[in-house]
Image (spheres, rainbow, N blue to C red):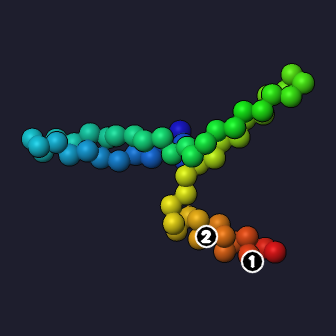
């Protein structure tokens, strides 16, 4: 799930000094289309500012 960008891993540090991994969903939205018995699922993950800039810049260069 982390490798597919569906989860983001973080660390929570407790008052006693111990730490634990925490996970947060990285899904912006999920689309499910059902048409004539066919199911199509599209997952849209969140982008941070750097990822968004890189994607936009790449789109500009390719056009």
Which label number is shown at residue 24?
none
Which label number is shown at residue 61?
1
Local SS, label 1: helix
Tell which residue pokes out farthest to the left in this image: 16
Residue 55 visible in the shown view: yes
Q: Position of residue 42 (x, y in %)?
A: 71, 40
Residue toward you, 39 or 17 = 39
Q: Position of residue 41 (x, y in %)?
A: 72, 35
Q: Position of residue 25 (x, y in %)?
A: 48, 41
Residue 4 visible in the shown view: no
Local SS, label 2: helix
- The residue tagged 2 is 54
Residue toward you, 20 or 47 = 47
Rendered view: 34 above or below 5: above
What distance separates the C-alpha of mark 1 from that of mark 2?
Answer: 11 Å
52 horizontally vs 31: left or right: left
Pick whichever of labels 1 and 2 is earlier in the sequence. Answer: 2
Residue ID at (35%, 47%): 10
Where, quadrant-wise, is the C terminus in this rendering?
A: bottom right
Residue ID at (20%, 46%): 13
Residue ID at (86%, 28%): 35
Q: Position of residue 40 (x, y in %)?
A: 78, 33
Rendered view: 61 above or below 20: below
42 horizontally vs 22: left or right: right
Tell which residue pokes out farthest to the top in this image: 37
Tell which residue pokes out farthest to the right in this image: 36
Assess disc 2: are there few (<14), some (14-19) or many (≥20) residues with their C-alpha within 10 Å of its C-alpha. Answer: few
6 horizontally vs 22: left or right: right
């Amino acid at each position: 799930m982390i490798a597919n960008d569906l989860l983001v891993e973080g660390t929570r540090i407790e008052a006693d000094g111990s730490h634990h991994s925490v996970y947060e969903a990285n899904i912006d939205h999920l689309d499910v289309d059902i048409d004539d018995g066919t199911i199509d699922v599209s997952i849209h993950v969140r982008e941070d500012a750097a990822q968004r800039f890189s994607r936009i810049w790449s789109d500009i260069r390719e056009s």
